[in-house]
Amino acid sequence: MKKVGIVMGSDSDMPIIEKAIAVLKEFEIPYEVHIYSAHRTPEQARDFAVNARKNGFGAIVAAAGMAAHLAGAIAANTTLPVVGIPCSSGGLGGLDALLSTVQMPSGIPVATVAVGGGANAAILCAQILAVEDKELAEKLNKKREKDAAVVLSKDAALQ
């Protein structure tokens, strides 16, 4: 199975990344986590992205706040799917990071989840990998069924 690469701009993003890691562990998807900054360590971020396919990755999650250029910098250097997680930092509640992550130029897409959406980023990566992995696709189906059952049991309790 392909790995998911997780890159965060700062260790302050770790609480969001922990949500992504929990999902990847649940689906038994191998992953690697790194701290690279689009601005402070651009060479390392570029090297990671350029070599990601060769190093066995199938998708990359990139989390950053404020200017949030990390996901775009990674996407500019690979043709693997990149899922951006805008992180809340500073006084704008993550809106700045959301806009920086989602507003990519034509030809360099970044799939973007909600501000702080670590779990959804990992689920999206699982769905991407499941295109070629029937066992993973079945795990995703079972999770959906389980999640639906939880909602329906809450509805039954309410009635």
Image (cartoon, rainbow, N blue to C red):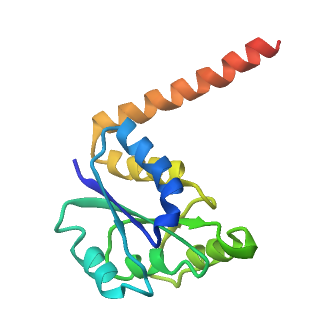
Q: Say which residue appears at 60% left-offset and 58% top-offset.
A: 116
28 to the left or right of 96:
left
93 to the left or right of 12:
right
Give the total number of marks visible in the rendering.
Answer: 0
Residue 4, quarter of picture: bottom left
Observer-nearest residue: 99 or 111?
Answer: 99
Q: Say which residue appears at 29% left-offset and 37% top-offset.
A: 134
Percent coordinates x, y for residue 100 in the rendering? 60, 79
Q: Say which residue appears at 34% left-offset and 45% top-offset.
A: 130
In the depicted structure, whether residue 43 falls above or below residue 61: below
Observer-nearest residue: 155 or 131?
Answer: 155
Residue 24, quarter of picture: top left
* Quarter of the picture holding the C terminus: top right
Percent coordinates x, y for residue 41 in the rendering? 36, 84
In the depicted structure, whether residue 56 falls above or below residue 132: below
46 to the left or right of 23:
left
Residue 45, quarter of picture: bottom left
Percent coordinates x, y for residue 124 in the rendering? 46, 51
- Kindly tell me whether residue 42 is visible in this rendering: yes
**Residue at the front extreme?**
12
**Residue at the right extreme?**
159
- Kindly tell me whether residue 84 is visible in this rendering: no
Percent coordinates x, y for residue 36 in the rendering? 38, 75
Q: Say which residue appears at 52% left-offset and 65% top-offset.
A: 12
**Residue at the left extreme?**
54
In the depicted structure, whether residue 38 falls above or below residue 55: below
Observer-nearest residue: 121 or 38?
Answer: 38
